[in-house]
Image (cartoon, rainbow, N blue to C red):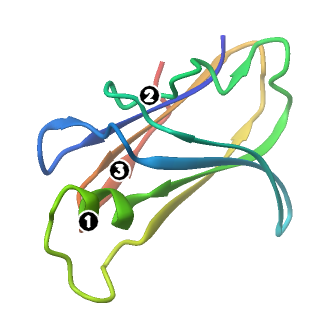
Amino acid sequence: MGLSTHVLDTMHGTPAGGMGVALYTTEGEAATLVKRFVLNADGRNPDGLLYDSATLKVGTYRLVFEVQAYFRAKGVALPEPAFLNWVSLDFGVADPRQHYHVPLLVTPWSYSTYRGS
């Protein structure tokens, strides 16, 4: 149980290892940084869960993924400005006894997310 994320680079068909991510708690328009991390080779947080079941609380959260920097570092020719710079996902946790998995499927021009298991 807890909160986790996983990013897949669907342009290259690989996990998005090396992408920077920031996790925030939110309240209205205010956001408080919880942690920054770089995804491992499997496209996941190298420290495991972002929150475990004991620390995940009811509330709203934001994950911000550094999409432009990741694709530029991969050598992808992007226009200036790039179509996607950061992808910001705001989501709510209603029942912290459940697992919340927030995956991101991303290219330089599109993204998709869902509540995973």
Front label number (3 vs 2): 2
Q: Nearer the viewer, residue 117 or 12?
A: 12
Q: Residue 36: name its quadrant.
A: top right
**Residue 8: mark:** none
Residue 82 versus residue 102 in the image, above or below? below
Q: Residue 79: name its quadrant.
A: bottom left
Q: CA distance from mark 3 to mark 1?
A: 20 Å
Residue at image point 78% right, 31% down = 94
Q: Nearer the viewer, residue 63 or 20?
A: 20
Name the spot of residue 54 as percent of width and height, x first: 84, 12
**Which residue, given by chain and number where applicable, does mark 2 sit on?**
44
Question: Which badge, 3 or 2, comes first in the chain's sequence?
Answer: 2
The reply, left or right, for residue 104 in relation to residue 38 is left
Name the spot of residue 25 as percent of width and height, x first: 80, 48
Front label number (3 vs 1): 1
Q: Looking at the picture, which amino acid does disc 2 mark? A: Arg
Q: Helix or strand or loop: what does disc 2 sit on?
A: loop
Name the spot of residue 24 as percent of width and height, x first: 74, 49
Badge 3 crowding class, 10 Å Cα cut-off, few under 14, some 14 to 19, many 20 or more, is: few
Residue at image point 46% right, 26% down = 116
Q: Looking at the picture, which amino acid does disc 1 mark? A: Arg
- Whether pointer 3 and pointer 1 mark residues with C-beta atoms closer than 8 Å, the reply is no
**Which residue, given by chain and number where applicable, does mark 3 sit on?**
112
**Which residue, given by chain and number where applicable, does mark 1 sit on?**
72
Q: CA distance from mark 1 to mark 2?
A: 20 Å
